[in-house]
């Protein structure tokens, strides 16, 4: 009995990727484009928030550098008891005068001739010349310290902070560019994983149709049992691969949600019809222009500015050996009893003055620290030279990958078109009673492999263009980092 042809499904599009990607792109108008994903990640991802925290931290460091130019105001309060000896002779106190008195009445004896109290000049043992009085002292008040002249230290600290701020801005800009590439990888990872799942599901459907067709014909007395078993075995072998593709698609979507700053369980819909607009690169600039491009790359500028910042820090450390001129003022109350604490007028104490501090020798401690920082600066300069050479290699490799990606994508398009045509032709012939089952199964396998090859080539094409832009110091979207 001849094979009975079954009705075929509508022909697929010219490219399997478009059909497979449609499985992961929903028809809803709120689907996420790649550019929207990049902007969302730049605003909400943990990586972007960490970069913002670095900005906040450096703002605090700048404020610390400026703090040296402002007065330092502090309040104090002290209470305690103690004693300290005092030499009365230091104040030239005269010896005490002793007058004679009646031993009984204790009345003073008056000299009638001089009409004065009689002075007793009898030698007596001298009294103590040093006194030691225990006292309770209580004080409170406000003290102000102001740097008047630091011999250039404050200006050096501010200049170094400004250089470091520009270095941090360049580092942040490069980190944003790398974050954009990370979002592209996660986005296309989710798209490709969903498309692979769609390819497996379509292949499984075709295989099930073939197995059902052979089994129906065999029940009607046509065909061979071995072909039925072979078709069922082939269909069953696809199921584990489909389940793995399903797992990979779910994991890829979770990875995309993470880099976007979303909850992992969010069902993010991806727009595969809208592509990121990136200007094509027709040719690489010449060597001199490439050197200029490399010098303007944010990471290179960050290395150079960090080197300058370290040199400024070393200079600042050496300037610690210069003198510092400052003023100090103090106003408060010094009391010896509790009731005197409120007597601001009678118990007031104050002090105003100018002081000079000049560290002459510290065992070369600051000098050693300055030498260490200078060594770090020279090491960073060498790292910058090394990085420039590696970047030149990176640009050359990115350019060659970009050139070959177009050729690979064109070859993948031809391969998938040919594989699709062969699969459909063999499927029609087989259902018409012509052809071998092994040829049909082999054609289906080739069609599936060609679909995977196109997915990889399409991602490689987009990725190589993005990598070339980053190698040239550009971002994926035109947005300056503030």
Image (cartoon, grey):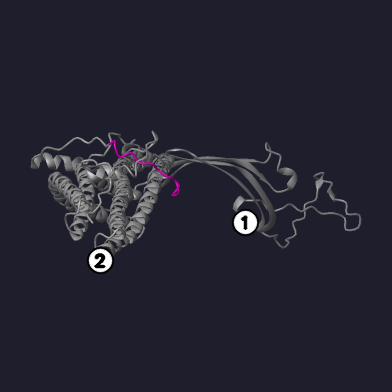
- Whether 314 is among the magenta residues is no
Q: Secondary structure at mark 2?
A: helix
Which numbered disc flags the more N-terminal residue, 1 or 2?
1
Percent of width and height locating residue 1: 23, 56
- Whether 270 is among the magenta residues is yes
Q: Residues within 10 Å of mark 2 (few under 14, many from 20)?
A: few
Q: Is residue 221 left or right of residue 398?
A: right
**Is 1 in front, or is 294?**
1
For the point 80% across and 51% down, the residue is 118
Residue 409 - label: none
For the point 17% across and 52% down, the residue is 390
Give the quadrant of residue 174.
top left
Q: Does residue 440 appear anywhere in the picture?
A: yes
Q: Residues within 10 Å of mark 1 (few under 14, many from 20)?
A: few
Q: Does residue 391 appear anywhere in the picture?
A: no
Relative to 248, is 413 above or below?
above
Q: Given the current orientation, which residue lies at the most extreme front position?
A: 1
Percent of width and height locating residue 169: 32, 40
Q: Which residue is mark 1?
A: 87
Magenta stretch, overall SS: loop
Q: Is residue 57 left or right of residue 78?
A: left
**Is 278 in front, or is 207?**
207
Give the magenta range: 262-274
Using the numbered discs, state the Cα–Cα distance from disc 1 to disc 2 in whole angstroms. 124 Å
Q: Secondary structure at mark 1?
A: strand
Q: Which circle, 1 or 2, is nearer the viewer?
A: 2
Residue 226 - label: 2
Q: Given the current orientation, which residue lies at the most extreme right position?
A: 105
Percent of width and height locating residue 323: 37, 46
Percent of width and height locating residue 370: 30, 54
> On the rendered image, what quadrant is the C terminus found in?
top left
């Amino acid at each position: 009995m001849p094979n009975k042809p079954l009705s075929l499904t509508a022909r697929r599009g010219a490219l399997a990727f478009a059909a497979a990607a449609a499985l992961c792109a929903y028809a809803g108008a709120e689907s996420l484009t790649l550019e929207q994903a990049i902007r969302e990640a730049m605003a909400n991802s943990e990586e972007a928030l960490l970069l913002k925290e670095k900005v906040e931290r450096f703002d605090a460091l700048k404020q610390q550098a400026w703090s040296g130019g402002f007065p330092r105001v502090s309040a104090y309060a002290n209470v305690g008891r103690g004693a300290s000896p005092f030499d009365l002779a230091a104040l030239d106190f005269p010896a005490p005068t002793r007058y004679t008195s009646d031993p009984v009445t204790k009345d003073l004896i008056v000299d009638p001739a001089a009409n004065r109290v009689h002075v007793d000049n009898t030698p007596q043992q001298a009294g103590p010349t040093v006194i030691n009085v225990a006292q309770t002292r209580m004080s409170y008040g406000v003290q102000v310290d102001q740097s008047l002249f630091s011999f250039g230290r404050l200006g050096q600290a501010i200049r170094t902070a400004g250089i470091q701020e520009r270095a941090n801005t360049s580092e942040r800009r490069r980190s944003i560019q790398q974050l954009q590439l990370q979002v592209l990888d996660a986005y296309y990872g989710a798209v490709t994983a969903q498309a692979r799942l769609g390819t497996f599901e379509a292949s499984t459907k075709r295989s099930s149709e073939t197995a059902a067709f052979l089994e129906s014909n065999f029940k009607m007395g046509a065909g061979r049992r071995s072909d039925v078993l072979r078709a069922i075995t082939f269909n069953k072998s696809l199921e584990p691969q489909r389940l793995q593709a399903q797992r990979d698609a779910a994991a890829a979507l979770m990875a995309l949600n993470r880099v976007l700053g979303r909850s992992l369980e969010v069902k993010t819909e991806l727009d595969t019809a809208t592509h990121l607009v990136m200007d094509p690169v027709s040719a690489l600039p010449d060597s001199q222009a490439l050197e200029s491009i490399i010098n303007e790359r944010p990471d290179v500028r960050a290395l150079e500015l960090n080197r300058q910042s370290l040199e400024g820090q070393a200079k600042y450390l050496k300037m610690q050996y210069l003198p510092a001129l400052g003023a100090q003022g103090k106003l408060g109350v010094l009391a010896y009893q509790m009731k005197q604490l409120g007597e601001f007028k009678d118990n007031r104490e104050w002090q105003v003055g100018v002081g000079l501090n000049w560290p002459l020798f510290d065992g070369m401690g600051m000098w050693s620290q300055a030498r260490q920082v200078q060594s770090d600066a020279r090491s960073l300069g060498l790292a910058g030279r090394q990085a420039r050479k590696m970047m030149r290699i990176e640009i050359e490799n990115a350019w060659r990958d970009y050139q070959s990606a177009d050729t690979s994508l064109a070859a993948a398009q031809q391969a998938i078109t040919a594989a699709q045509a062969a699969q459909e032709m063999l499927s029609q012939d087989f259902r018409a009673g012509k052809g071998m089952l092994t040829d049909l199964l082999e054609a289906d396998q080739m069609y599936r492999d060609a679909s995977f090859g196109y997915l990889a080539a399409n991602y490689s094409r987009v990725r190589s263009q993005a990598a070339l832009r980053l190698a040239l110091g550009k971002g994926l979207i035109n947005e300056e980092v503030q």
